[in-house]
Image (cartoon, rainbow, N blue to C red):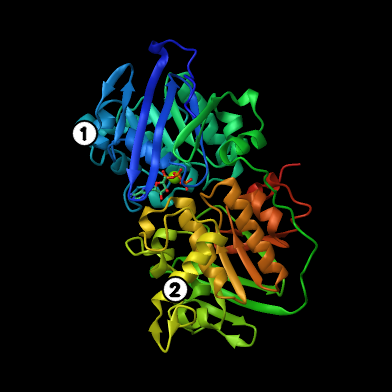
Amino acid sequence: MSTPAPARAGTAEIAVRLRGIGKRFPGVIANDDINIDVRRGTIHAIVGENGAGKSTLMKILYGVQPPDSGTIEINGEQVALSSPADAIKHGVGMVFQHFMLADNLTVLENVVLGAEKLHGIGGAARDEIRRLSDAYGLDIEPDELVEDLGVGQRQRVEILKVLYRGARVIILDEPTAVLVPQEVDELFGNLRGLKSEGFSIIFISHKLDEVLAVADEITVIRRGTTVSTVQPTDVTSRQLAELMVGSELPSPSTEASTVTDEVLISVQDLTLTNADGRRLLTDISFDIHRGEVLGIAGVEGNGQEELVESLMGMRHGARGTIRLRGDDLTSMSTRDRRQAGVGYIPADRHRHGLLLESPLWENRVLGHQFRAPSVKHGMIDKTAARADTERIITEYDVRTPGPDVLAASLSGGNQQKLIVGREMSSEPILLIASHPTRGVDVGAQAAIWDHIKRARREGLAVLLISADLEELIGLSDRIEVILRGRLVGTFDPGAVTPEQLGSAMTGAEAQA
Ligand SMILES: Nc1ncnc2c1ncn2[C@@H]1O[C@H](COP(=O)(O)OP(=O)(O)OP(=O)(O)O)[C@@H](O)[C@H]1O
Ligand SMILES: [Mg+2]
């Protein structure tokens, strides 16, 4: 199906025009005849399933990779972009989902890095940062250390970095996945401010309600092709999802309780201090029962990662005890903990979840080198591992040519589905799921929710950490809020709203 010319607007109003963009990778057509007009001074959302080709397209527009076919026009002029520097020269900037800031540098240093020619590295640069921050309500202080900033602030620094370099078109690839509701509202306020100043925003998200709330136009990409461009007033989120996937979608609702009184994991007084004496975790204690999902809510960076890594034995030096059924895990290695029955879906799939330069079947074996079906007589059984990878690909709907492709070639959401499939395959007693649906599309999200519900029904204990509060509320039997390394409140998911949780997470008083 070819795309109807979306613009009623005249050419002069078009900031970015993409025509017939195509991009192939071995065995995959990532983009196939993409046509989009982004009007100046609008927020243009792009939605589509995992692997639909959104990030590929944005990398083409940001000069990271060339298209195989098609043309890019910026302000009516056809351009060839062979690097991000080229794209920036033409006024196109991009904020990636994984922030690229150096923690130990100040905001000023981060912003000027690589752009010293513009305003130097001193007073003039500081003035320019203040000016941009004031003009667009970014609330950024140039001399603060990045490590002292929260997630929302870091993201605003990334936006400021792009503005500082003179971008007029700003691409944001899944910017809201890491934000709490209040921060999402702030971001949208910033984006609306920018658009009213004539900036054009391209916004990718899997959260369709957000897309409908903030976008002026929405382009749907299905399997590499633009299927339509719609106005948010003309569609519901369900219709949008149907345009993306073409099928009905379930929602995350808690099923009848399966919680028993058998404690599977018991954590007592877990306390962790870093090398320079700073407390990362303080007296964390909780039990999770057979058939229970314990949700942890918190703003990123409040100890979630340290908690999970301490439970997994990836971080040492924690005081306190961790018992899994009868076993004392406290001084076990990560490998022994996995053997004892801990499954782990890591938050950062690039750092902990996958070997990107290895094929999928080797990634199937990763962390499970010591058990069937991947091993036989102490040797890696490639045939069995490949076959089991095929099973995961089918069961978890991983969109890929097959088990021999490199993990790096999968789209973000498909990498996540592979990890979930692998971790569920080892039949754990405790499943630690850290942001299990981050970056996955609505269909895959529903599938992963089903897998977590099934785990609960089958009597696992699940520790769920998620920035998606709807997900936490929908799946958890109990929610604990973590703030500055302490558990500061217990909530009943049946009775709490996302706004109340958001307030507890930021330490603000709950609003009436
Ligand atoms: N460097 C690469 N090598 C091989 N295949 C790739 C490469 N980059 C992307 N692909 C493939 O291209 C397709 C589109 O991927 P892309 O990352 O653009 O999807 P996406 O729409 O951003 O998905 P998600 O919502 O999961 O982030 C996928 O099938 C992916 O596996
Ligand atoms: Mg993507």
Q: Position of residue 507 (x, y in %)?
A: 62, 51
* SS type, badge 2: helix
Residue farthest toward the left in the current orientation of the protein: 117
Q: Is residue 402 visible?
A: yes
Residue at the disc numbered 1: 120
Query: Any mark on residue 385, and which?
Result: 2
Label 1 environment density (alpha carbons within 10 Å; few <14, some 14–19, many ≥20): few
**Residue 60, image quadrant:** top left
* SS type, badge 1: loop
State whether label 2 is within 8 Å of ligand 1: no
**Residue 460, image quadrant:** bottom right
The mark tally for this picture is 2
Quadrant of picture, ligand 2: top left
Q: Position of residue 52 (x, y in %)?
A: 47, 42
Quarter holding the C terminus is: top right
Q: Amino acid at mark 1?
A: Gly
User: Residue at point 73% right, 47% down?
Assistant: 497
Mark 1 / mark 2, whichever is N-terminal: 1
Q: Is residue 10 left or right of residue 287?
A: left
Q: Position of residue 278 (x, y in %)?
A: 45, 65
User: Residue at point 47% right, 70% down?
Assistant: 387
User: Residue at point 70% right, 72% down?
Assistant: 458
Q: Is residue 161 visible?
A: no
Cα–Cα gap, marks 1 and 2: 55 Å
